[in-house]
Image: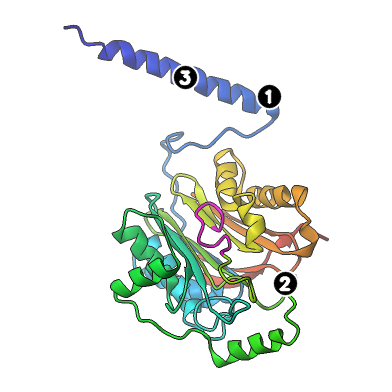
Amino acid sequence: MISHKYEIEPMINRRNFILGSTITSITAFLGLKEPVTAKSSNVTTEIKPIVISTWNHGLPANEAAWKIIKSGGKAIDAVETGAKVPEADPEANSVGYGGYPDRDGNVTLDACIMDETGNCGSVSYLQHIKHPISVARKVMDDTPHVMLSGAGALEFALQKGFKKEELLTDKSKAAWKKWLEKSEYSPIINRENHDTIGLLAIDQKGDISGACTTSGLAWKLHGRVGDSPIIGAGMFTDNDIGGAVATGMGEAVMKTLGTFLIVELMRGGMTPQEACEEAVGRIAAKQDYKSFQIGYLAINKAGEYGAYSIQKGFNYALHKNGDNQMHKANYLNK
C-alpha cells in the first residue's frame, strides 16, 4: 500500500499558504493591521508580569495577587487570591460578604475564572458562600462543567467543604430597608456601588488568567444574573493573545459579548486600548448608552493594557513594575 502522507501534507501547506496570503491581502486592502497568531513569530520577547483590576477595591486585590506573581506562582492562583480580598470585605457592598441584596433581601453572587489553558469555571445565583470565585475554581478543576447555578452551586460548594454563611450585613440590610421605602429601581451612573471586581494577570512565565466576581446590581429582580459569570461577557482570556474584563451594566455587556470581542479585536491587530474603545463603541451604536455605565480593561501578551468606559468615573488599579496605583480611564460620553 502506498502511503498518501507526503501527498496530503503539501496540499494542506498550500491551502494554509493561500489562506494566509488571502487574509493578508484583505487586511492590507482594508487598512487593517495583520492578524496576530500564536505561531506568527519565533522572536522571544521579555515577559512583563502585570496585575490589573477594576475600581478602588482593586488596590488590595492587586497586592494579594502580586504576592503570588512575585513568588513565581501561577496567574490563575493570583487572580483567585486577589478576587477573594473584596469578596471577604464587608465594606465592599457590591462583592461577596456585605454585598447589596436583590429587591427581596437576598444576597446572590456570580463569579467566573479562566486559566492559561482555556479551562474555565463559573457560578451564578449562588447564595450563602463568601467566596464564589473559589467555588468557580472548583467547578473548573473538579468537574467537566463550566457553570453551576443556584441550589446546585450551593450544594456543590458545601460538598467541597465551603461554609454556609449569612452574607447580608447590618449595613447592607439597612441600605436595603431604606430602598424599600420607595422601591424604585433604576441604574445610577457611577454611584458608589461599583458592581464588579475583575482581575487580569500575567505571571513570570508569561501565562494569562482572569477572574470576575460580584453580588450584581443592588435591588435587582430575584434570580437576575448579569455578565460576570459568563465566559466571554464578564471576562475572557486567550493565552496566545490577551484578556479582558468588564464592569457596569451586565445586560449591555451580554448583548455584545464584550470581553470575547475585545480579545478577538486584539487578535486582529488592535492594541488593548483600541479594542476597549471599539467594544464600548459597539454598545453605544445600538443601545441607549447615556443611562448606564460600562467599563472595560484589557491586557495583551506583551503586557500592554487598555481601559475605556462609557461615562466618566471608571477607574482601575494597575500593578506593574512593582508599583500599584489607581488610574482614571478615558471615556466616551463627554
Q: Quadrant of residue 71?
A: bottom left
Of labels 1 and 2, the one closer to you: 2
Q: CA distance from mark 1 to mark 2?
A: 41 Å
- Please tell me whether residue 231 belongs to the stretch shown in magenta: yes
First reached walking from the N terminus: tag 3 or tag 2 = 3
Q: Quadrant of residue 203?
A: bottom left
Pick whichever, 61 or 295, lies toward us. 295
Q: How dense is the environment of label 1, judged by Cα within 10 Å: few (below 14), some, or many (20 and up)?
A: few
First reached walking from the N terminus: tag 1 or tag 2 = 1
Q: Are marks 3 and 1 in contact (CB under 8 Å)?
A: no
What number is the disc on residue 29?
1
Q: How dense is the environment of label 2, judged by Cα within 10 Å: few (below 14), some, or many (20 and up)?
A: some
Pick whichever, 251 or 114, lies toward us. 251
Magenta stretch: give its range.
225-234
Read off the residue under disc 3.
Answer: 17
Read off the residue under disc 2.
Answer: 190
Where residue 126 sits in the image (x, y, percent)? 46, 71
Where residue 82 sits in the image (x, y, percent)? 45, 72
> Is 145 on the left-hand or right-hand side of 174?
left
